[in-house]
Image: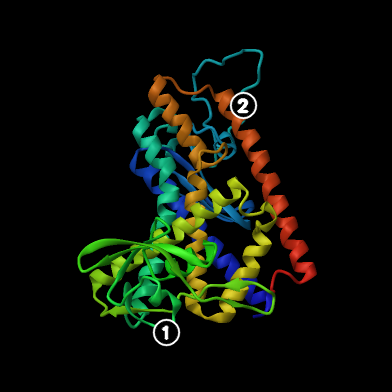
Amino acid sequence: MSTVVTILLAILIFGLVIVFHEFGHFITAKLSGVQVNEFSIGMGPALCKKIFRGTQYSIRALPVGGYVAMEGEDSPESEGARPAAKPGDPAEDADEEPEEDLNPVPLEQRTGKPFNEVKLWKRFVIIAAGAIMNFILGYLVLLGIVGCDTSVITLKIYGFEDGAKCAATGLQAEDRILAINGRTCYVPEDISYELSRTKNYSADFTVLRNGEKVELSDVQFDTYTDKNGQTYMPPQIIVYSLKKTPGNVMKQAWNYERYYARIIFSTLIDLAKGRESINNLSGPVGIVAAIGQAASVDWKTLLNLLVLITVNLGIFNLLPFPALDGGKLVFLAIEGVTRRPVPAKVQEYVNLVGFILLFSLMLFATYNDIVRLVTGQMFS
């Protein structure tokens, strides 16, 4: 895969994920009667822009983000798009010069309300809608992936590979796997994922057998060691497949969405508990490299990576951390409890600290990517 094609694919994937995220904020703001001053894809200088029905739509030079600037929202974009004082409004201080109106939308075209003047529940929906649209994008892509498969794979065991140790230590044909080590299984990939996290080359299974839930302790598995000395535990399980129907496809797509979401949650928990090293974090360079590798395999692998990226963005944005959508939701929740908004200065300082921490983390992850790229570890 050439570097140019990889970069173009990365821009396409990032753009799609960003458009869906920002569209969630945009459409819910519009439906809630909020004045949206700008809907921008990309950051930096504007390549093209057009005002339509009270909103400026922009495509900007740097494909590293986007934003929806809403009237009255405490954000850098909205601060730069505040309304001009109406003719005849008294100045707050006669000695001060009136602030310049940086809003690209003419005053007479602004028909919506400021963000902070609509009902609390509407503000909550507007902020959460970006992440929700990322989950919707992931589900739509998964519908396409599952719909193109020849069948729908289940978690019901048909049989085992010859000599499989797990068949001699508890599992039986016709068992439906419900959970491994207490964690619910949604799709066949859960089996491999959970076994990769277990120790001592055994696991506890919960299965449905003859209509009853059965607990199986210490199910043993065969192992093999690769050339790098890494030991693996292959499942050696053969499962049933179902005929494709619209209902089966939709259900399986939803199961895969839950599978990806849990992988992301598990990784975040492992990082917090120190099970995973922060040195394994990847930034934009690593993601672009992963896109190139996925595209070199096949389109299905690339689309699965797209799902992982968009679901990851949705979950990450909902974390209750300053400068993220989740942090904004915390402020709104506090307002709902106290009946008073968190002071703008407090929000500003907290978000600034959060932004600095997130930017530092991104720089650290990018440094990791560059080191792995230079040393050849990224593609090993």
N-terminal of the pair, mark 2 or mark 1, is: 2
Residue 366, x across and y down, in percent: 71, 56
Residue 39, x across and y down, in percent: 50, 49
Q: Which residue is mark 1?
A: 161
Q: So how many labels did they put on this image?
A: 2
Relative placement, left or right, of 34 versus 11 is left
| Residue at image coords 49%, 19% | 88
| Residue at image coords 68%, 79% | 227
Asked if residue 352 is positioned above or below residue 92 in the image, the reply reads below
Asked if residue 364 is positioned above or below residue 355 in the image, the reply reads below
Q: Nearer the viewer, residue 250 or 38?
A: 250
Which disc, if any, is residue 217?
none
Residue 308, x across and y down, in percent: 50, 62
Residue 241, x across and y down, in percent: 30, 79
Q: Nearer the viewer, residue 168 or 13?
A: 168
Q: Which residue is mark 2?
A: 99
Figure quadrant of the C terminus:
bottom right
Residue 141: quarter of image = bottom left
The residue type indicated by label 1 comes to Glu
Q: Secondary structure at mark 2?
A: loop
The residue type indicated by label 2 comes to Glu
Instruction: Report the residue that reaches farthest toward the right.
Output: 374
Q: Nearer the viewer, residue 337 or 260?
A: 260
Discs 2/1, front: 1
Relative placement, left or right, of 31 versus 260 is left
Q: Secondary structure at mark 1?
A: loop
Q: Is residue 69 in view?
A: no
Instruction: Report the residue that reaches farthest toward the left.
Output: 211
Q: How is the image coloured?
A: rainbow
